[in-house]
Image (spheres, rainbow, N blue to C red):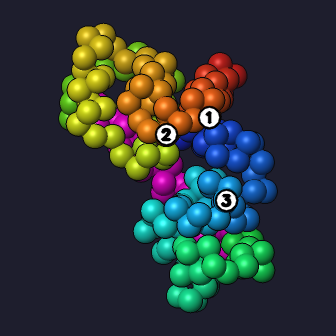
Amino acid sequence: MKTLNELFRLVILANELDNNLDAALRFSDPDGVLSGKSGWSFGVCQFDTRNNSEALKCLADCGLTQDEIHGIVDQTIDVKPLAFNLISHKDIVAKYDEAQLSHCLDSAVNFNNAHCIPVTDTAALLAQADYVNQYGSMGDSFAAYLKGINRPVEAHDILTFKLEHTKYGKDHPKDCRRRYDNLIEVVKNA
């Protein structure tokens, strides 16, 4: 039987890298148009370099210079040769990934405890943790929505919140459903 952390890693691997672990050690463009909105991403968790200070620390720990890091964030540099730094420091990238995975799970548990929100099962908790990985945190409107359900929260409730209450969910419903389906598949096969 897999631990919660192992299950969550599988969910994130499916959601962020389409189960291609090799992609963790390459830079990718989350929006696909080099807009600079997220910067280049990397790792199993697909750290957005523009939106995640831990991503910048990881890159520095992998031996990248501040100029290279700024180029990665602003998407103004050729990142193909810089992927060598990720590959040669894969243990460092893995350490940051594990910290992010733990942070997301801990955030979900702490959020539920702080707001007295019961969840039905592992899938619901993993859906909340995936929400944290994707959006950064859960706020007051998320808490109010979950409390308003007046029953233990299920994974599909998180999907419904994304689709009805987030800009990303309204603009990208297929991706939100894909993430949900991946999560359910991981839990089903656990």
Amino acid, disc 1 = Asp
**Earlier residue among tags 3 and 1:** 3
- Image side of residue 138 versus residue 42, left or right: left
Majority SS type along the magenta span = helix
Residue 125 seen in the figure: no
Look at 41% across and 35% down and name the residue there.
Answer: 166
Find residue 90 and report its image quarter.
bottom right
User: Which one is in front, 47 or 123?
Assistant: 47
Q: Which residues are magenta?
A: 89-112
Look at 57% across and 35% down and name the residue there.
Answer: 172
Residue 134 locus on image (x, y percent): 49, 45
- Image side of residue 108 versus residue 141, left or right: right
The residue singled out by tag 2 in the image is 168
Residue 129 locus on image (x, y percent): 45, 38
In magenta segment, residue 94: yes
Q: Residue 33 got which mark?
A: 3
In magenta segment, residue 123: no
